[in-house]
Amino acid sequence: MKVKQLIPSRSAIAHLRFVFSLFLFPVFLFALSQTPVMHFSKVWLVFFIWHFLAFPASNGYNSYFDKDEESIGLLKKPPRVDISLYYFSLLIEALAFLLSLLVSWYFAVAVLIYGTMSKLYSHPAIRLKKYPIISFLTVFFFQGAFIYWSTYFALSAASPFIHWPPQLLVAGAICSCLIGASYPLTQVYQHDEDSRRGDRTLSLLLGYKGSFIFSGALFAIGLVLMFAYWYPTGNLSKFYAFLGCTLPIFVFFNWWFYKVGQDNTNANFQNAMRMNFLSAGCMIAYFGWLVWMW
C-alpha cells in the first residue's frame, strides 16, 4: 500500500456520504434525550465517532464493493470508485475505534462490532446483502437498537452488564422499527441494478407494493411501541407530539404509495430521497425536542 492511497480522492469523499449519517442522527438524539446522567464531555466525542467516522466508513466500504453505476443514497450519479476509498474507509474506521477507547472499552467494542458487521454486509466473500432476510435483520438491529444502546451506555457511563429496565429494551425496539421501516424504501428504486449484481434485497423479495406495505406495518409497530414507552411515565403528551411530527411522513408515504401503484417508475431516486430527508427532518425535530426538554 502506498501512502497516497490513504489520501482520499474526490470520488472517495463523495462515497463516504457524510450527509447520509443524518438519517441515523435521530437514534443518537433519542439515546441522548433518555440518558439519566449525562456526561457532556462525551456527547460530542460519541457524536463525532458515529457520524463522522464509523458511519461514513461503513458507507465508503459498502460503496467500494458495490461499485454502483446507478443512483444510490444521496448520489444520483455516483462517481467511479478507486482504491483510496477502500483504504481511507479502513483508516477512519480505525480512528473511530481508537477514539472510542477514550469513552469506554465497551463502547470501543461496540464500534468494532458495528464496523465488522458492515464488512460482512458488503464484502463479496460473505455479502449478507445478497440475502434479503439476513440483510434486513442486520440493518434492523445494528443501525437501530444496537446504536441506541451503545450510545446510551456510552453517554451515561453506565455499565451494560447490569439489569436492563424494560424501557431501555422498548426504546431500542422503537429505533429498530423506525430504521427497519425505511430500509426497503431505500432499495425500491434499485431493483434493476441489484438484480444484475445478484443481490436479492428485501425490496426485490417483497416487490413494489409489498415494500410499502411492509414499511407501513413496521412503522405502525413503532407507533405502538412509542405509546408503550411513554404511557407508564405519564408523559403521553410526548407520544402525541411524535404523532404530530410524523404526520408529514404519513402524508408523503401514502401519496408516494399511490403514485407507485399507478406507475412503478415513480419508485425512483428522487422520491426515495424526498422520503428519506422528510423522515429524517421530522424525526430530528421530535427527538431534538426531547433533548431540549431534558
Image: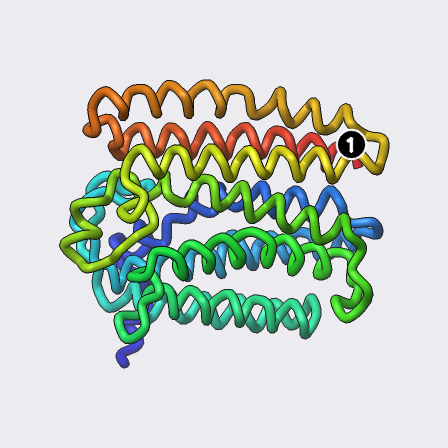
Q: Where 40 sits versus 130, above or below?
A: above
Q: Residue at x 42, y 25 (%)?
A: 253
- x and y percent of residue 269 in the render? 27, 34
Question: Which residue position is annotated with label 1?
Answer: 293
Q: Residue lying furthest left in this view?
A: 196
Front position in the image: 134 or 123: 134
Q: Where 195 sits versus 23, above or below?
A: below
In which quadrant of the rendered view does residue 197 lie? bottom left
Q: Badge 1 local density, few (<14 within 10 Å), some, or many (20+)?
A: few
- x and y percent of residue 170 in the render? 69, 48
Looking at the picture, the colour scheme in use is rainbow
- x and y percent of residue 58 in the render? 41, 60
Q: Is residue 253 left or right of residue 223?
A: left
Q: Residue at x 24, y 26 (%)?
A: 266
Q: Is residue 232 left or right of residue 144?
A: right
Q: Where 83 sits versus 192, above or below?
A: below
Amino acid bearing label 1: Met
> What kind of element bears circle 1?
helix
Q: How many marks?
A: 1
Picture quarter with the C terminus: top right
Picture quarter with the N terminus: bottom left
Q: Residue at x 66, y 57 (%)?
A: 149
Q: Is residue 99 left or right of residue 12?
A: right
Q: Residue lying furthest bottom in this view?
A: 1
Q: Residue at x 60, y 54 (%)?
A: 145
- x and y percent of residue 157 in the render? 78, 62
